[in-house]
Amino acid sequence: MSHDITLLPESNVCIFTFHEGWDTAAGVEKRAQDVKRILAEVEKPVFLVMNLSEVRMTLDGVVRSANRLARGPDAPFHHPMCRGVALVTTERIAQMVARGLQTETFGNLRVCVCSDVEEAIQRAQEGNG
């Protein structure tokens, strides 16, 4: 499997863990469908943690992901049950991605970059995502 989904109902966090070899460009539609499915199933708004720590981010993948997940009428990251998004990675491009997603073009998305999943969960619980 190219990714795992873990819902932590006690903390209202959903973790998507992408494994080595995940193609960020080719896999974006599957990721969007999975995010939308989870958001349709939860009873309370959740904070989405995108654990990309095993994935090599590409410019093409970043552009496709941002456009599919944060723009348009059915953008999963703007779903009413999405409290915010954390990108877990040490890749430098992630900081630029986060700044871009926080602009009007992408709907002023609430997004942060964390170095590990624990930090992302903590920021979600503190409301600092």
Image: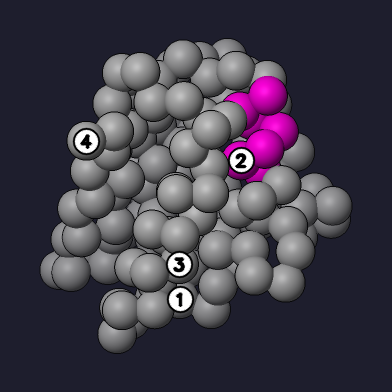
Real-space Cα separation, disc 2 to disc 1, in angstroms: 19 Å
User: Mark 2 or mark 1: which comes first in sequence?
Assistant: 2
Q: Is residue 86 magenta?
A: no
Displayed quadrant of residue 60: top right
Magenta-colored span: 60-66
Q: Is residue 127 visible?
A: no
Pointers 1 and 4 in contact (C-beta within 8 Å): no
Return the x and y of residue 20 as percentages of the image width and height: 31, 18
Q: Is residue 64 magenta?
A: yes
Q: Nearer the viewer, mark 2 or mark 1?
A: 2
Q: Which mark is residue 36?
A: 3
Pointers 3 and 2 in contact (C-beta within 8 Å): no
Q: Nearer the viewer, mark 4 or mark 2?
A: 4
Real-space Cα separation, disc 3 to disc 1, in angstroms: 10 Å
Give me the residue at 63% from left, 63% from top.
75
For mark 4, what is the residue? 1
Q: Badge 2: how crowded within 10 Å, few (<14), some, or many (20+)?
A: many
Q: Secondary structure at mark 1?
A: loop
Return the x and y of residue 100 as percentages of the image width and height: 75, 38
User: Mark 1 or mark 4: which comes first in sequence?
Assistant: 4
Three-letter code, disc 4:
Met
Pointers 3 and 1 in contact (C-beta within 8 Å): no
Give me the residue at 65% from left, 51% from top.
68
Q: Secondary structure at mark 4?
A: loop
For mark 1, what is the residue? 81
Q: Badge 3: how crowded within 10 Å, few (<14), some, or many (20+)?
A: some
Three-letter code, disc 2:
Ser
Give me the residue at 55% from left, 63% from top.
76
Location of residue 58 with respect to 1 vertically, above or below: above
Return the x and y of residue 108 as percentages of the image width and height: 73, 57
